[in-house]
Image: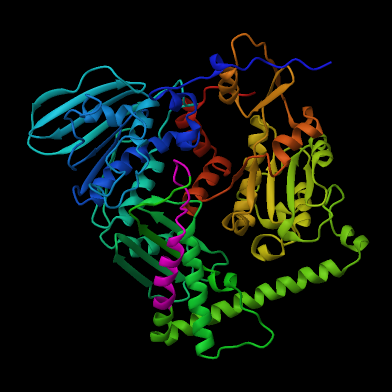
Amino acid sequence: MPTATKSYAAEDIEVLEGLDPVRRRPSMYIGGVDNRGLHHLVWEIVDNSVDEFLAGEADSIKVTLHKDGTSITVEDNGRGIPVDKHKKLKKSALEVILTTLHAGGKFSNKNYARSGGLHGVGSSVVNALSSEMVATVHRDGHEWVQRYKRGKPTTPVKKVRPFRGHGTSIHFRPDDDIFRRIHFHADTIRQHLEDISYIHAGLKITFIDDVHGEKYELSHPDGIKAYLDKLIQDESKKLVHEPTFATEKDEKSVRIEVVLKWTESTDEQMRSYVNGIRTRAGGTHESGLRGGIARAVKNYMDVHNIKHKGLSITPDDIREGIVTILSIFHPDPMFQGQTKDKLNNPEVISLVEGLVRPALETWLNNNPSIADAVIGRIVLAARARQASRDAVSEVRRKTPGSRKSNLPGKLLDCRSNKPEESELFIVEGDSAGGTAAAGRDSLKQAVLPLRGKILNTESLALNRILQNNEIKDLVQALGAGVGPNFDPHLVRYQRIILLMDADSDGYHISTLLLTFFFRQMRELIQQGRLFLAQPPLYRITVGKESWYARDDRDRDEILASLPANRNPDIQRFKGLGEMNAVQLKETTLDPNMRTLLRVDVDSVIAADETFAQLLGKDPSERYRVIMEEASEVDDLDV
């Protein structure tokens, strides 16, 4: 008997018009509807103002966080968005830009030789996801205003009054039908604007925080050189040399700036920007920089016949301890996705490497004392790495029985002895640990179940911390020491993944573990090896088809996309233990299916303050944070 199939005809095909696609699938355009996506709206509008600066038409931007904490105004003194009629669409250009995807003046180089907003969707996406937006334009001797609601104009473009001057002001309030909670963080906005002011030397940015009654004037004429010094100072890194290596070129519409210093830190810190936009996921420009640094040092060592018997210098050894900032301006950057986290232009590799390699090699030749200090730092890194490799090899040479005897009994280890292909899941509870063990790839995935909430390690001495059995098991499983004796090269797994229930207890345990890693094994975070798993909260089934939702909003989006005549079965997982091995594998364990959040620290100082406030000994700090953030809580899981 053939099985019945669902009807699929022309009437089932939907055509979304205008800005409906943005409201239906906002995550495609801003990366998510969480706190990061909320602030991404601000970055989109600010980027448009920065583009006016890059075009040489503006020199100041003012950003105001209003007293309600839920609305923003971004003003610049650029040319002002055109308000005259668009010949084809018979509408004001202002309305076209703010209500139409892929409409703007940045698709050619006529008005913007270098721009961050090249997709023509930024302003219109913000409009679509805002319950209200007001655009005020000063140009042609007048002030022009138009109002919008959820991406649709509620008034025509009105000529309000005569006005001497020029510029654009965009006021918007995100839509609470879209975002989980609406509360802008002043510190997040200020830090982002300060970064921009460093990258764009000469740009004056004013941030007005009406929530706390504060005003910040952000301007850094020394540009990324001053930014580099700030990053090193903020993280209290000890320098190998004082003078900064800096190089730049500006030709054929491409501008590249690089600054770097070697420190005694064991991590490599690289910040990259394209047309003023932070590329957190790196890309081809970072590949060119890494290659240029490694080849320059290699060439210097070869020319000066610097050799160390039995010691192999790798690119990782050369870049260990480096703090560097790379900023490029490109007329046609190929970003990966609307959130522009990664650059994909292949020609940029050779452009950046071709600038950095000869310049750095010349700088080392002209500064022999600095070169000696740098080479000494690199040799120490290579020796430490070699010692780590030897120690790992010694461990691998032990018999399986003796190897297992040094590991905690509850650890369900993987069969592979290669750290570069192995990962450890730290799981909440024995029940979930058993499910994870049954669903894992036993060759490459290890599971360590923890019993209950681990010790709060904030403000505790290391000897007190190591008296806790759960932490002792974790330290033994990783096999790399702890605190000042922690060596990231000895960690037995490439990835450490926190897998907790999607409830308040799970979030608390994750926070306690993050505190421990930040205080006692920070290099794991700095190397991008610590992750948070994203298990689903719901399973939605219709007939033989199933969908998984990570939270209530995800569930609602899935339900809204189903035909009205379907009756879905909704299962809520109270914990990981309620999922079977197959479900956990296909949603959370399988590298081809899962979503992981990498733990990243933008500012060590800010992270230090946050952990101290939330988990420190002073309860008044905790109370203050809870009261300030209480307005954001719309669904308390108790």
Location of the C terminus (image quadrant) = top right
Above or below: residue 278 compared with residue 24: below
Q: Position of residue 266 (x, y in %)?
A: 58, 67
Q: Position of residue 492 (x, y in %)?
A: 75, 59
Determine which quarter of the picture holds residue 245: bottom left
Q: Nearer the viewer, residue 191 or 464?
A: 191
Above or below: residue 66 compared with residue 204: above
Extreme residue toward the top, this view? 565
Q: Position of residue 296 (x, y in %)?
A: 48, 77
Q: Tell me which residue sits at (38%, 75%) in the image.
A: 243
In the image, residue 113 lies in the stretch drawn in magenta? no
User: In the image, is 78 to the left or to the right of 484?
Assistant: left
Instruction: Write the start and end of the magenta stretch as one range.
Output: 337-360
Task: Mark yes or no: residue 232 visible.
Answer: no
Determine which quarter of the picture holds residue 210: top left
In the image, residue 338 lies in the stretch drawn in magenta? yes
User: In the image, is 573 to the left or to the right of 297?
Assistant: right
Task: Mark yes or no: residue 335 visible.
Answer: yes
Above or below: residue 8 compared with residue 315: above
User: In the image, is 352 to the left or to the right of 32?
Assistant: left
Snapshot colouring: rainbow
Above or below: residue 121 compared with residue 600: above
Q: Tell me which residue sits at (59%, 14%) in the image.
A: 563
User: In the image, is 48 to the left or to the right of 529?
Assistant: left
Q: Position of residue 318 (x, y in %)?
A: 55, 74
Q: Nearer the viewer, residue 323 or 555?
A: 555
